[in-house]
Amino acid sequence: MRALVLLAAVSLAMTACVKPGGGGSAGGRYVDPYTCEVRNPRPNDQPYDADCIKAAQRVAEAAAKAAAKTKK
């Protein structure tokens, strides 16, 4: 059960981190789901995606809560 909750949380975070392209390169802009680094950034983009980082933090919190519940 715990693994299923963790898997669902991770897949949700991965989905939140992926953004469609729109940059000027052939590959388009996207966010690396493992590092939250913006690839092929637009001129004014930050090097890391804030939404991706927040989603990863929420997943870590949910995983910690799920792990704490299974220990009880």
Image (spheres, grey):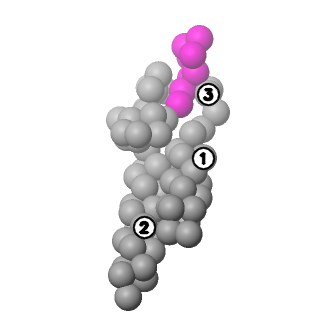
Q: Amino acid at mark 1?
A: Thr
Query: Label 2's element?
Result: helix
Question: Which label number is shown at residue 15?
Answer: 1
Q: Amino acid at mark 2?
A: Ala
Q: Quadrant of the C terminus?
A: bottom left
Q: Residue at x 45, y 62 (%)?
A: 59
Disc 3 and disc 1 in contact, CB within 8 angstroms: no
Left or right relative to 1: residue 70: left
Q: Is residue 9 above or below residue 52?
A: below
Label 2 sits on residue: 63
Query: Label 3's element?
Result: loop
Dominant secondary structure of the residues highlighted in magenta in the image? loop
Q: Quadrant of residue 47?
A: top left
Q: Farthest bottom residue?
A: 72
Q: Nearer the viewer, mark 3 or mark 1?
A: 1
Question: Which label number is shown at residue 21?
Answer: 3
Q: Is residue 64 above or below residue 26?
A: below
Q: Is residue 66 magenta?
A: no
Q: Amino acid at mark 3?
A: Gly
Disc 2 and disc 3 in contact, CB within 8 angstroms: no
Pointer 3 local density, CA inside 10 Å: few below 14, some 14–19, many at least 20: some
- Give the percent coordinates (x, y) of residue 2: 50, 68
Q: Is residue 24 magenta?
A: yes
- Which badge, 2 or 3, is on the more N-terminal residue? 3
Q: Residue at x 58, y 21 (%)?
A: 28
Q: CA distance from mark 2 to mark 3?
A: 30 Å
Give the extent of the magenta segment.
23-30
Q: Residue at x 46, y 49 (%)?
A: 52
Query: Label 1's element?
Result: helix
- Which badge, 3 or 1, is on the more N-terminal residue? 1
